[in-house]
Amino acid sequence: MAPIPGSGLAKGLAVTLRTMTRKTVTEQYPEAQPELPPRTRGVIGLFEENCTVCMLCARECPDWCIYIDSHKETVPPAAPGGRERSRNVLDRFAIDFSLCMYCGICIEVCPFDALFWSPEFEYAETDIRDLTHERDKLREWMWTVPAPPALDPAAEEPKEIAAARKTAEKLAAAQAEPQEGES
């Protein structure tokens, strides 16, 4: 059976009329804040205490938008007779969000969990040069990072925790045995 000429046009107009009669669901942004999904990619927050200045994030960034400066300091020995050690100290950590493409590679490669996604998205500037945010601003955003989702109660216990628990139980049993023999 051949289609009726103009039936496609009629179907399209029917969809348009149905849509026109529905109430709109536009949210007025500044007055009504949007409901963001839990793991929204907004900006990158820096947890400075975890940063060891390994430079992995800056090296792996495809846009080269992460700037890190550091210097070395010598740390006195932990025990008498030990040797001095040197460690890197973070001087500058900046991200140029005018170059960043929000791929998240820097967050994935960070071995010490110093970088996190923050759902903060209101950081527009009138001058593009102001989109390079230094470590103070990145630290402020760290406190807006949501807590990780809770573990599934029905999930298997992680092997690291199971091994630590077994070791703790063995130590507790070993310490309890001499106390029982003394009585």
Image: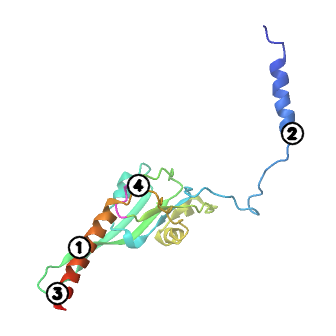
Snapshot quadrant of residue 110: bottom left
Picture residue at 35% right of the left edge, 54% below the top: 59
Mark nearer the N terminus (2 vs 4): 2
Observer-side mark, 1 or 4, equals 1
The amino acid pointed to by label 2 is Met
Mark 1 against mark 2, which lies toward the viewer? 1
Q: Amino acid at mark 3?
A: Gly
Q: Residues within 10 Å of mark 1 (few under 14, many from 20)?
A: few
Q: Nearer the viewer, residue 52 or 169?
A: 169
Residue 172 locus on image (x, y percent): 25, 78
Mark before the other along the chain sequence, 1 or 2: 2
Residue 181's label in the rendered image is: 3
What residue range appears in magenta?
A: 106-112
Q: Residue at x 34, y 57 (%)?
A: 56
Placement of 23 over or under 12, stated as above or below: below
Q: Is residue 124 left or right of residue 105?
A: right
In the image shown, does 94 or 161 lie closer to the viewer? 161
Label located before the other in sequence (1 or 4): 4
Q: Nearer the viewer, mark 3 or mark 4?
A: 3
Q: Which residue is mark 1?
A: 170
Residue at image location 61% in from the left, 63% down from the top: 123
**First of labels 3, 4 by sequence position:** 4
Give the CA separation, mark 3 to mark 1: 17 Å
Write down the residue under mark 4.
Answer: 108
Structural distance between the alpha carbons of marks 1 and 2: 71 Å
Measuring from the top left, give residue 146's x and y in whole percent.
Answer: 54, 65
Whether pointer 2 and pointer 4 mark residues with C-beta atoms closer than 8 Å, the reply is no
Q: What type is the residue that disc 4 sits on?
A: Glu
Element under disc 1: helix
